[in-house]
């Protein structure tokens, strides 16, 4: 796109943070992050955003790219017209300071995944591969294209992030601290890559901290901010020194000018910083920025429009994103690759699960059907259901949050939607959980030796455990998407689980509970699982030998056993309906919680 001009005149940017307290309720705090910041960036230019820590460099970058959630008072224009979030996301790339990626993929696999989900779906695979190959060569990634992302150096990871953003050939590129954490060689290499892009007509805007003299000379425009988000300078980078010298600041000879400028802006005296900002605000340079901003607005009226859209932007509005089906297929593929390449953790968890299955089964071996066996069998049912629920609930709860930062970043960048992601995770989790639960049940069932250990008896035994495992996955997904960190989720999950298994029927005779407590059992996934397993075990037993000791109460039938624990043989269907209904509702709530987080949290 030729002659693209990004201009902005931001009066204030206010971000509100919320602190929730049980005693004081919700308290909101407002922070003004930007204050009277104006500027212009044109095609083929390299603009550096510099300033001390906390001056608003990343905030300005995220605001211009429409990737920050906050109350912005002011205007951001493309070619003199207000730009909305949808267009800016499509027309620009954003290289973040933190390179969040699914690190089990190779460089080539990662680029193929991103190309399919970011590019127009009408672009053929051959064209995609050609673009990927060119980017790999241009950014010097040929030697590591088959290397896992986890094994890359900092400079290589940064260039991979840059390649991802260049897949759609955006005319504007935002980079947040692209040299942070890199040695001088890699820092220069990354900036040279950006300089090459600007030489081809791209608008490159970078926040950067303490650049070397070689890096600083590659920028033709400079924006300086001070704490409080105020503008100290905007203009040609090579004229910044002269501007500050006109304010009677000295620059030592043979020193990097950017170091001297940053030391001036790190001045703890707020009055002096305010004086610097006020001097620039009164300067001719600032007046020219405001004049150019207004001139662009006036000239925009004369530009050719098609249905109210500038003709140059039509190709970005007409881009067709991949279908939901394509998003699901590629997300499912990535999840499978991730599971295979991180199989060590899964194998360890599986071995521990099987070992626990053996341990809880050994005390119940060689049981004889008598009065003593009633309590033993119920304890066995409870152990199987409890271990199944806890294992899968907390397994999901501790693994899912690790993916949330990458998820929020990719969804915020429009790579895919929350729906296909959530569904793909469930489609990977459910078969794995089903296999683990069946193997766990095989160990438990055949070690104990229930009903002659026939295949039919095993399926009857395993079905409630499977249903309990599925609802546990749903519960784990819901809790981990609802809260921002695993600690908060665990703090709530522990008391909820305690109440749930207290009303499973093992500790209380459920039919004897008062009416104001009896309803709690219907909220317990432990209750549904244990009752279903108990009904399937006891309902077909018609005779249980009584003890020779007349003082020991005798329960002579399986139905009697069910009544003893407050279970009803007529509830079997309702138990499975309850389990599967809870599974569906928890997944629905988990998905809605995920959408809410994606909508409310800033990407950067």
Image (spheres, rainbow, N blue to C red):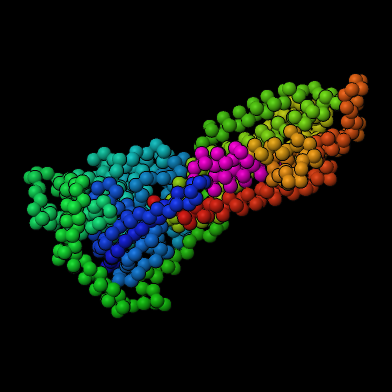
In x, y percent, where is residue 109? 45, 46
Q: Position of residue 395 (x, y in %)?
A: 58, 37
Write the residue at 45% across / 49% down: 19
Answer whether residue 477 is magenta in the image: yes
Residue 163 as seen in the image, left or right of residue 226 = right
Quarter of the figure with residue 537: top right
What secondary structure predominates along the stretch shown in magenta? helix
Residue furthest toward the top?
A: 549
- The residue range painted magenta reads 467-496
Q: Nearer the viewer, residue 233 or 504?
A: 504
Q: Is residue 460 placed above or below 46 in the rendered structure?
A: above
Q: Is residue 474 left or right of residue 56?
A: right
Q: Is residue 239 magenta?
A: no
Quadrant in which the N terminus is drawn:
bottom left
Give me the residue at 30% from left, 71% from top: 80
Q: Residue furthest bottom?
A: 302
Q: Is residue 153 left or right of residue 432?
A: left
The residue depicted at 57 percent of the width and 45 percent of the height is: 479
Where residue 533 sits in the image (x, y, percent)? 77, 38
In terms of image quadrants, where is residue 153? Answer: top left
Q: Is residue 430 visible?
A: yes
Q: Does residue 117 show up?
A: no
- Across and down, in percent, residue 127 comes to 42, 57
Residue at 64% from the left image edge and 37% from the top image edge: 498
Vertical comparison of 8 with 302: above or below: above
């Amino acid at each position: 796109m030729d002659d693209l001009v990004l201009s902005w005149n931001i009066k204030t940017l206010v971000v509100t943070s919320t602190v929730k307290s049980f005693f004081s309720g919700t308290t909101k705090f407002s922070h003004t992050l930007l204050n009277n910041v104006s500027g212009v960036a044109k095609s083929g230019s390299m603009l550096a955003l510099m300033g001390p820590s906390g001056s608003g460099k990343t905030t300005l970058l995220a605001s211009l790219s429409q990737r920050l959630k906050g109350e912005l008072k002011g205007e951001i224009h493309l070619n003199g017209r207000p730009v909305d979030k949808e267009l800016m996301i499509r027309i620009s790339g954003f290289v973040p300071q933190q390179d969040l990626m699914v690190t089990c993929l190779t460089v080539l696999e990662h680029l193929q995944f991103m190309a399919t989900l970011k590019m127009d779906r009408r672009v053929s695979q051959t064209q995609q591969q050609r673009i990927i190959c060119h980017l790999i060569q241009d950014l010097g990634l040929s030697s590591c294209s088959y290397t896992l992302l986890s094994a890359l150096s900092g400079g290589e990871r940064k260039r991979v992030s840059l390649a991802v953003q260049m897949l759609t050939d955006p005319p504007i590129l935002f980079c947040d601290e692209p040299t942070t954490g890199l040695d001088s060689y890699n820092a220069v290499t990354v900036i040279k890559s950006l300089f090459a892009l600007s030489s081809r007509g791209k608008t490159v805007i970078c926040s950067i901290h303490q650049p070397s003299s070689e890096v600083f000379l590659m920028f033709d425009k400079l924006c300086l901010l001070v704490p409080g988000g105020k503008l100290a300078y905007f203009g040609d980078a090579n004229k910044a020194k002269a501007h500050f010298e006109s304010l009677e600041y000295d620059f030592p000879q043979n020193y990097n000018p950017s170091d001297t400028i940053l030391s001036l802006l790190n001045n703890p005296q707020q009055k002096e910083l305010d004086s610097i900002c006020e001097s620039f605000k009164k300067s001719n340079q600032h007046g020219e920025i405001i004049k150019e901003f207004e001139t662009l607005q006036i000239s925009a009226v004369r530009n050719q429009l098609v249905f109210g859209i500038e003709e140059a932007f039509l190709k970005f509005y007409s881009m067709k994103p991949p279908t939901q089906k394509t998003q699901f297929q590629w997300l499912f593929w990535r999840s499978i690759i991730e599971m295979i390449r991180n199989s060590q953790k899964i194998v360890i968890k599986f071995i521990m699960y099987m070992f626990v299955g053996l341990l809880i089964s050994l005390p119940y071996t060689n049981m004889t059907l008598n009065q003593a066996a009633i309590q033993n069998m119920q304890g066995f049912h409870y152990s199987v259901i409890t271990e199944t629920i806890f294992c899968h609930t907390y397994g999901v709860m501790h693994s899912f949050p690790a993916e949330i930062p990458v998820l929020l970043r990719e969804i915020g960048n429009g790579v895919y939607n929350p729906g296909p992601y959530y569904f793909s995770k469930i489609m990977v989790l459910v078969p794995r959980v089903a296999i683990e639960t069946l193997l766990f049940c095989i160990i438990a069932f055949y070690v104990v030796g229930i009903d002659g250990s026939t295949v039919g008896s095993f399926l009857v035994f395993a079905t409630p455990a499977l249903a309990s495992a599925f609802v546990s996955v749903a519960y784990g997904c819901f809790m981990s998407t609802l809260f921002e960190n695993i600690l908060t989720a665990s703090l709530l999950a522990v008391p909820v689980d305690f109440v749930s298994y207290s009303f499973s029927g093992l500790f209380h005779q459920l039919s004897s509970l008062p009416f104001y407590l009896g309803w709690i059992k219907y909220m317990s996934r432990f209750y549904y699982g244990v009752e279903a397993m108990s009904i399937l075990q006891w309902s077909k037993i018609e005779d249980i030998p009584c003890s020779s000791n007349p003082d020991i109460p005798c329960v002579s039938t399986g139905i009697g056993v069910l009544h003893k624990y407050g279970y009803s043989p007529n509830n079997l269907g309702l138990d499975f309906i309850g389990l599967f209904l809870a599974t569906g509702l928890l997944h629905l709530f988990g998905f809605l919680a995920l959408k809410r987080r994606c909508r409310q949290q800033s990407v950067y």
